[in-house]
C-alpha cells in the first residue's frame, strides 16, 4: 500500500480539428438559412408543395389487375418556376427490365431448392402500363419515362404560387406476394380460390420538390422507400360486391356498401373501449363460399396525407373500437381473414389503440380519424391510417410465443409509422433511419407499456453490442443512403433506436430527452425534416451539446469498448508514528512471500547468524515498528504546522483510488461506475462523456471514499452498449459463455400443441 497521494496524470491534449471526436458538427451539417434555421426549426420562408388526387380504381379479381385513372392537382408553393414535374412509378421496380433485377448480387449457394430457382426464373410482367398523360381537357402532355420516374414537360413553367391539374390513366398486373414478394400485392387462398389484396404504390405519385435538393427523383431500387408531398385524396375503389375494403381515409358511402347491421355495429364500436365485430368470422366464411357476382364502389376521402393504400377481400373479418386522444375520438380497426385467428381478433385492434396512445404521448397527438391494421402473411408495411402486418397462427389455431410477439411487434411498429414518416415526413429514399430508427425507438417505449418486461428485439443498449463489434467492412455509418447500407436492420432500425434510448436513459435523462424529442415532432409534423433538423432541435430544446454523440453514433462505425485498465489504491500518510508504524507492521506480516522463502525454512535447518550470536548488529536487533520519544516529538512539531481542517483530513482515514480507462472502441461514452465497499454498501458515479474531450484514448480519474473499496463494476446497468464486458470490473471478472455439446431436436411442435397433446394423454 502506497502512503502518498499521487494526483491524476494529465495527458497531452489532442488537436481540435475535425478529426477530434468532440469537434462541432458545423462543417458536416448544411448551413442554416431562411428555410431551415439554426435551431432546427422550419425557417420563416419554409415551403412545401401540395399534391391533391382524385382517383378511380378497379380491381379485376379474375385476372389480378388494377386499372386506374387519376387527376392530380399540383400546387407550387416554392419560390421557383418549375419547367417540368417528376412523378414516381414505383411499380416499375417489377418491370422486366428493372435495374433492381440487374444489380442484385447472386451466388450459386443462394439456390438451395427448386423453389429458389423457380423464383429466379419467374417471368412476371410487372410495372405500370401508362395509357395516357393529358390535361384535364384531354390534350396530350409531353412526357418521358426513366425507369421508376416519369417527367412531364410543361408547355410553360409552373409559376410560383400557382397550380396545375392533369390526368393519368394506367393499369398493371398485381404481383403474387407469396411467389415474388413485395410490400403489397395479393395472397391466393387455394382452398376456396379467394384472394386477399393489400394494395400500395399503386398509382403514379408526385415526387417531393423541396429546398434541400430540388426534386427528390432518386430511382426506386427496392430498399430506399418513399418521399411524398402531402395532399387531399378522394378515391373510388371498385371491387367485387362481396369484398370488404379497408383504406386510408374515411368511408363516404357506408349506406351503399355496408348492411344496416354492419352500420349499427360500426356506430356501437365508436363508443366502445373494446373491439366490436363489424363483420364476423361466420359472415366472412359465408362470403368466401358464396362468391357473389357484381361490383361495388367504395369511396374514401383523406385530408393532409402523403399517400393512400387499401386492402380488399371477401375473406375479411372487421372489428373496431374507439380511442380517445386528447379529447378526440379515433377509430382503431383491424381487417383479417379467419387464418389470422385466434390471434387477430384477440389482440390486433387493442394493439392499434395502445400504439396510438403511447406514440401520441411521446410525439404528437394522432391527427387522423382512423388507424387500421390489416393481416396478410409475411408482410409488414405502413401507409397513412393503414398498415399491412404478418403474424399467422398454425392451421390448428395454436401459435408459438415467437409468432405472438412477432405479431405484436409488427403491429406496433407499422401503426407507429403513422407518426414516422406519415406525419413527421422525412425522406425515406435518402435516410431510412429517420423513419425506421425513430419509429423503432418509440415502438420500444410502446412495447414496455404493453407488457411488463416485454422481450423487445431492439432498444436496450446491450442488444446492439454484437453488431457494433462486428466486421467493420460490413458495417455502415447510420448516415448512409438507404440503398448503400450494410446490415439494413441493425443499421437503420437497431442502432439509431439504441442511440436514442441511450440519450434518454444515460446522456440526457428522460425529462430533457422527452421534451426535446416532442419538440422535434411538433416542429416537423406535416413537414419534411432532415437529419440536421433533428440533430439541431434535440440540442436546441435541451441545452445539451450532443455533437460528439451524433458524430460518433451516426457518422462513424466506431464501437463502445471502454476498458478499466488499472486501479491504484492510496491512503494518506497521517504522520502519526503510532498509527503508521502499526499499519506498516500489519502490511509486512501479511505480504506475499516469494516461493523460496517457505522452502528455505525447510531446507536450511540453521543459518549462520542463528548459530553465531555475534553476527547480528544494531540494525538486525532494531524493532523498526517501535515508536520512540523522538518519533513523538517530531509528530508534535508536524501537527503545529497544520490547520485544524488539515489535521482532521490526515486523520480521516480517507481512501484514494486512481482508475485508468482506455477507449478501445473509439466511441466516447459516459463512464458509469458502481463501487462496492467493505461493508457491502454501494455507490454509483456517473461521469459524462466529456471526460474524453481532450484525452480520447486514455484517461485517469481519482476517487476519494471514507472506506475501502471491495470491487468496481463499470456499466453496471448495461446502458452504454459496451461490446466487451470482460474488461469492466476490478478485480477482473470473466463472463462465461455457454456452449452446448448436444442440441435438442426440433420437433416442429409449438408449446400450445404440446399442451393439447398432454391433455389428450390425460396428463
Image (cartoon, rainbow, N blue to C red):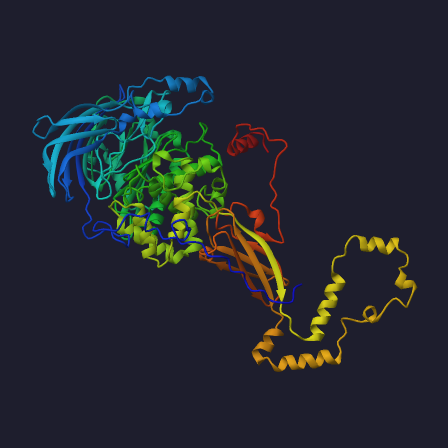
Residue 153 vertical position relative to residue 49 in the rendered view, above or below: above
Give the x, y percent position of residue 219: 27, 31
Residue 83 lies left or right of residue 445; in this view the side is left
Judge by depth and name the residue closer to the eye, 154 or 317.
154
Measured as percent of width and height from the top left, residue 620 is found at: 82, 68
For this rendering, which residue is in front, 531 or 336?
531
Q: Quadrant of residue 155?
A: top left
Nearest the eye: 671 or 526: 671
Residue ID at (62%, 34%): 740
Please report the residue visible at 35 percent of the width from the left and 18 percent of the height from the top.
Answer: 122
Q: What residue is shown at x 74% (from left), y 66% (from top)?
A: 586
> Which quadrant, please, contains the C terminus?
top right
Residue 220: where, in percent of width, then height? Answer: 29, 31
Where's the N terminus, which quadrant?
bottom right
Specify whether 569 is left or right of 158.
right
Q: Quadrant of residue 92?
A: top left
Residue 265 visible to the viewer: yes
The relative height of residue 168 versus residue 711 in the rendered view (above or below) is above
Residue 403 percent coordinates (x, y): 45, 34
**Between residues 144 and 580, which one lies in front from this camera angle?**
580
Report how many numbered discs are placed on residues in the image: 0
Left or right, residue 293 beside residue 702: left
Residue shown at the point (83%, 71%) measured from the top left: 618
Residue 444 makes an appearance in the image = no
Indicate left or right for 475 with 682 as reference. left
Amino acid at each position: 500500500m502506497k502512503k502518498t497521494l499521487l494526483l491524476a496524470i494529465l495527458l497531452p491534449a489532442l488537436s481540435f480539428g475535425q478529426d477530434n471526436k468532440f469537434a462541432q458538427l458545423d462543417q458536416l451539417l448544411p448551413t442554416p438559412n431562411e428555410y431551415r434555421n439554426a435551431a432546427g426549426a422550419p425557417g420563416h420562408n419554409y415551403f412545401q408543395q401540395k399534391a391533391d388526387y382524385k382517383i378511380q380504381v378497379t380491381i379485376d379479381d379474375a385476372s389480378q389487375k388494377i386499372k386506374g385513372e387519376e387527376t392530380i392537382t399540383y400546387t407550387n408553393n416554392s419560390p421557383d418556376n418549375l419547367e417540368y414535374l417528376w412523378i414516381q412509378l414505383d411499380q416499375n421496380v417489377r418491370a422486366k427490365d428493372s435495374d433492381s433485377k440487374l444489380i442484385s448480387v447472386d451466388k450459386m449457394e443462394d439456390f438451395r431448392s427448386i423453389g429458389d430457382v423457380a423464383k429466379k426464373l419467374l417471368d412476371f410482367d410487372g410495372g405500370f402500363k401508362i395509357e395516357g398523360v393529358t390535361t384535364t381537357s384531354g390534350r396530350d402532355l409531353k412526357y418521358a419515362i426513366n425507369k421508376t420516374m416519369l417527367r412531364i414537360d410543361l408547355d410553360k413553367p409552373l409559376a410560383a404560387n400557382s397550380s396545375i391539374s392533369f390526368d393519368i390513366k394506367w393499369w398493371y398486373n398485381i404481383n403474387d406476394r407469396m411467389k415474388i414478394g413485395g410490400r403489397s400485392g395479393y395472397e391466393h387462398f387455394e382452398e376456396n380460390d379467394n384472394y386477399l389484396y393489400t394494395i400500395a404504390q399503386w398509382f403514379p405519385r408526385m415526387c417531393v420538390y423541396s429546398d434541400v435538393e430540388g426534386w427528390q427523383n432518386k430511382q426506386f431500387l427496392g430498399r430506399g422507400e418513399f418521399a411524398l408531398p402531402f395532399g387531399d385524396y378522394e378515391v373510388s375503389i371498385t371491387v367485387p360486391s362481396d369484398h370488404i375494403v379497408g383504406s386510408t381515409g374515411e368511408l363516404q358511402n357506408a349506406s351503399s356498401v355496408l348492411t344496416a347491421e354492419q352500420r349499427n355495429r360500426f356506430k356501437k364500436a365508436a363508443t366502445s373501449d373494446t373491439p366490436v365485430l363489424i363483420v364476423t368470422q361466420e359472415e366472412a366464411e359465408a362470403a368466401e363460399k358464396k362468391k357473389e357476382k357484381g361490383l361495388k364502389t367504395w369511396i374514401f376521402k383523406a385530408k393532409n396525407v402523403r399517400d393512400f393504400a387499401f386492402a380488399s377481400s371477401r375473406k375479411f373479418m372487421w372489428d373496431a373500437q374507439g380511442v380517445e386522444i386528447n379529447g378526440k375520438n379515433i377509430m382503431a380497426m383491424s381487417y383479417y381473414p379467419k387464418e389470422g385467428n385466434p390471434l387477430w381478433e384477440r389482440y390486433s385492434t387493442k394493439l392499434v389503440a395502445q400504439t396510438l396512445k403511447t406514440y401520441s404521448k411521446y410525439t404528437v397527438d394522432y391527427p387522423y380519424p382512423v388507424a387500421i391494421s390489416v393481416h396478410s402473411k409475411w408482410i409488414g408495411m405502413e401507409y397513412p391510417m393503414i398498415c399491412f402486418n404478418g403474424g399467422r397462427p398454425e392451421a390448428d389455431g395454436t401459435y408459438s410465443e415467437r409468432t405472438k410477439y412477432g405479431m405484436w411487434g409488427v403491429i406496433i411498429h407499422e401503426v407507429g409509422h403513422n407518426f414516422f414518416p406519415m406525419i413527421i415526413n422525412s425522406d425515406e429514399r435518402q435516410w431510412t433511419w429517420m423513419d425506421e430508427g425513430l419509429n423503432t425507438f418509440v415502438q420500444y417505449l410502446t412495447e414496455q407499456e404493453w407488457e411488463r418486461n416485454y422481450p423487445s428485439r431492439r432498444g436496450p443498449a446491450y442488444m446492439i453490442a454484437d453488431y457494433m463489434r462486428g466486421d467493420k467492412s460490413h458495417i455502415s455509418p447510420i448516415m448512409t443512403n438507404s440503398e448503400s447500407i450494410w446490415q439494413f436492420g441493425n443499421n437503420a432500425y437497431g442502432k439509431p433506436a439504441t442511440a436514442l434510448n441511450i440519450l434518454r436513459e444515460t446522456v440526457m435523462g428522460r425529462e430533457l430527452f422527452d421534451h426535446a424529442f416532442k419538440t422535434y415532432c411538433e416542429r416537423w409534423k406535416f413537414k419534411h425534416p432532415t437529419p440536421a433538423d433533428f440533430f439541431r432541435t434535440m440540442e436546441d430544446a435541451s441545452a445539451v451539446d450532443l455533437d460528439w454523440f451524433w458524430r460518433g453514433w451516426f457518422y462513424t462505425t466506431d464501437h463502445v469498448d471502454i476498458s478499466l485498465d488499472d486501479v491504484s489504491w492510496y491512503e494518506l500518510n497521517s504522520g502519526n508514528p503510532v498509527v503508521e508504524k502499526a499499519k506498516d507492521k500489519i502490511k509486512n506480516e501479511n505480504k506475499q512471500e516469494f516461493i523460496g522463502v517457505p522452502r528455505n525454512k525447510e531446507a536450511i535447518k540453521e543459518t549462520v547468524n542463528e548459530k553465531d550470536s555475534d553476527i547480528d548488529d544494531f540494525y538486525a536487533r532494531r524493532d523498526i515498528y517501535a515508536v520512540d520519544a523522538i518519533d513523538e516529538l517530531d509528530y508534535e512539531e508536524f501537527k503545529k504546522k497544520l490547520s485544524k481542517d488539515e489535521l482532521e483530513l490526515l486523520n480521516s482515514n480517507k481512501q484514494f483510488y486512481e482508475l485508468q480507462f482506455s477507449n478501445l472502441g473509439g466511441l466516447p461514452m459516459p463512464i458509469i461506475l458502481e463501487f462496492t465497499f467493505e461493508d457491502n454498501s454501494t455507490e454509483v458515479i456517473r461521469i459524462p462523456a466529456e471526460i474524453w474531450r481532450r484525452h480520447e484514448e486514455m484517461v485517469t480519474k481519482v476517487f476519494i471514499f471514507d472506506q475501502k473499496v471491495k470491487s468496481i463494476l463499470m456499466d453496471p446497468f448495461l446502458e452504454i452498449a459496451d461490446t466487451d464486458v470482460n474488461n469492466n470490473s476490478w478485480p477482473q471478472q470473466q463472463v462465461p459463455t455457454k456452449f452446448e455439446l448436444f442440441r435438442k431436436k426440433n420437433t416442429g411442435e409449438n408449446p400450445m400443441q404440446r399442451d393439447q397433446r398432454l391433455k389428450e394423454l390425460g396428463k
